[in-house]
Amino acid sequence: MRSTEAFEAFYKGELKQSLQSLDQVRKTILTYGLSFVGVLLLSFLLAFVIIYFFQPGQSGMILIVVSLILIFIGGLIYVSSKTKELAYKKIFKSKIIHPIINFISEDLSYHPNQKINQNQYERSRLYLNNIDKYNGDDYVSGKIDQTVFEFSEIHTQYKSTSTDSKGNRRTKWVTVFKGLFFVADFNKDFEGSTVLLPNYWGKGFKFFKKLAGVSRIEKFVQLEDAEFSKNFNCYSTNDIKARYILSPALMQRITAFKEKYPKNPVAIAFVDGRIYVAITYSKDLFEPTYFKSLVSIELVKTYFEDVKFVVDLVEELNLNTRIWTKS
């Protein structure tokens, strides 16, 4: 796997010039944005002046004419800004994210407008809520040694409707999962499902951990590794198979992986010979910045580290180690 030092050389030789060109586009978009805000402020100011200093009939006509002119100008600025913003994102992913992914491994394929199939998300059994919106992008697929894997950003939501005391209906969209969703072939054959969910209860509270899984077909499994159980609650359709999958070595790797990234809730599922990993993020991982210069090794390195972080899962969880039960 490529090192951070190698990436720094790649940045200077391949990315920096593209970033300098893109940074000019970023500044133009900001200029458009500031111009749009300026037009809005000018509209309010002119409206105040016209209403305050002109006669009622006269001020109405002037206000209508001025408003139409400013709306037209503001509309042009807004449309131009959005057009440039879409082009900016497209070029950024083509000229920056795509080369970064190929730098990490030429065996990786990147499709910025695609996402993990919804069936994969549902098969994972990580999130059982019925969802009304399924969005995502930045799909990456590939193979490291013998392990085929794929991942993308995913945002799932359901619609919640409520009625207040006055009979007014309110609708809001509730996020079920937002982050990075990873799917890979696992190195052992098995049937059924074993699900690891973040443990918010601590070491004790066994009753509440069982209660949390009451809506699942999987039942709570008490594992012997105390450190692992501090981070995850385990639910499985078969406790014997759960222990077969979760070897002491794998539990240590998962614990080390979780402790390496303590701020990101991690959920993991093993379903019918595949592993699913859902890592919650509040930010969009592969989107360009607007308020900071793009020409920064530290900024661009975060994109490299985000991709490498996911690819490293294959090695972190030792997915390439094949035993006799799986060819």
Image (cartoon, rainbow, N blue to C red):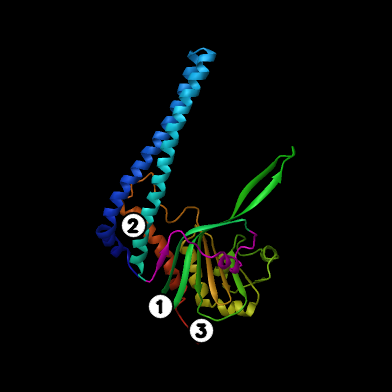
Task: Examine the rendered structure and indicate whether residue 107 appears above or below residue 179.
Answer: below
Query: x, y percentage for residue 151?
Result: 48, 65
Whether residue 71 sits left or right of residue 295 in the image: it is right
Question: Which quarter of the rendered picture does the N terminus lie within?
Answer: bottom left
Q: Give percent across and percent down for residue 321.
A: 45, 80
- Amino acid type for the residue under numbered disc 3: Lys
The residue at 48%/18% (across/down) is 50
Note whether 85 is above or below 204 in the view shown.
Answer: above
Q: Distance between the residues labelled 2 and 3?
A: 39 Å
Q: What element carries label 3?
A: loop
Instruction: Look at the image and give the residue range highlighted in magenta.
Output: 107-130
Question: Which dot marks residue 326?
Answer: 3
| Residue density around tag 1, few if under 14, some if 14–19, many if 20 or more, within 10 Å | few
Residue at the spot 64% in from the left edge and 64% down from the top edge: 204
The secondary structure type at the circle numbered 1 is loop
Q: Earlier in the sequence, mark 1 or mark 3?
A: 1
The residue tagged 1 is: 145
| Quadrant housing residue 211 | bottom right
Q: Give how far apart the Cα atoms at labels 1 and 3 are.
A: 14 Å
Q: Residue at x 38, y 45 (%)?
A: 84
According to the image, label 2 marks what residue? Answer: 95
